[in-house]
Amino acid sequence: MQQPYVADLAPEQMRDRLHEALSIYVRAMGYPASVARRRAPMWAEHALRPGWRAAAVLAPAAEEDHAALRGTLLGIAYGYTGASHQWWYEQVHRGLSRARGSTAAEQVLEDYFELTELHIHPSAQGQGLGDALLGQLLGGCPASRVLLSTPEVVGEANRAWRLYRRRGFEDVLRDFRFDGDPRAFAVLGRALPLTMTTA
Ligand SMILES: CC(C)(COP(=O)(O)OP(=O)(O)OC[C@H]1O[C@@H](n2cnc3c(N)ncnc32)[C@H](O)[C@@H]1OP(=O)(O)O)[C@@H](O)C(=O)NCCC(=O)NCCS
């Protein structure tokens, strides 16, 4: 087996590998397989949004697989340009307006890339692949900041939190509840560009 590598995914490549990408997502998040089927239309629609970009971690079977973007999918990440008519924007705007006032909310949400999904298959976690995938996705991203939401975890004690903190993500909103989800989330963000020179 060759070393896994990271690469950008074009919308049509995401479409071709949507099923595989969703199965990484449900395995990484510990969700039942049925969630993948329900999420498929949403992921496909997201790929049509302005500023959408995606990156993958692939495990090639042979050297030539690199050039052809072949190999088993081990990780997937995507996001798009945030905009005021989007559900996530509206939710975070509501939370930020309550916490800091609407002017501050609009400033934070003025020009951002929403990091929507970032997942590594459980069998491949803890080897630096999530970090490399994050760098690939955000490299060359034209927005002035990146925002994301992640479930609150006691002591910030999971790999997602450690990765985001290591890469300079700071609190935007804590203990926030999105409509229809009983879990508490944090919204984190950092300025772009993200430089990957330090570990
Ligand atoms: C969050 C997630 C994407 C991170 O990806 P990952 O590949 O597991 O994590 P990383 O490669 O960044 O780092 C994991 C560990 O590898 C270590 N590491 C980092 N770079 C490394 C490298 N080049 N070589 C070896 N190890 C490295 C880090 O020290 C880190 O250790 P830590 O977790 O104790 O801090 C992944 O764990 C995942 O999919 N989790 C479940 C789903 C999830 O939570 N997604 C995010 C939702 S918002």
Image: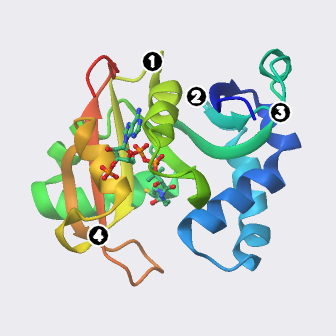
Residue at horizontal 75%, vertical 71%?
Answer: 38
Q: Are marks 3 and 2 in contact (CB under 8 Å)?
A: no
Closer to the chain start, of discs 4 and 3, is: 3
Q: Which residue is mark 1?
A: 142
Residue 66 screen position, x and y as percent: 77, 20
Cα gap from disc 4 to disc 3, whole angstroms: 37 Å
Residue at horizontal 77%, vertical 49%?
Answer: 44
- Mark 2: amino acid: Gly
Residue at horizontal 72%, vertical 58%?
Answer: 22
Mark seen at residue 152: 4
Q: Which residue is mark 2?
A: 51
Q: Quadrant of residue 63?
A: top right
Q: Which residue is mark 3?
A: 61
| Residue 4 as seen in the image, left or right of residue 179 | right
User: What element does badge 3 sit on?
Assistant: loop
Cα gap from disc 4 to disc 1, whole angstroms: 28 Å
Q: Are marks 2 and 1 in contact (CB under 8 Å)?
A: yes
| Residue 30 as seen in the image, left or right of residue 193 | right
- Mark 3: amino acid: Ala
Closer to the chain start, of discs 1 and 3, is: 3
Nearer mark to the viewer, of 4 and 1: 4
Residue 47 screen position, x and y as percent: 71, 40
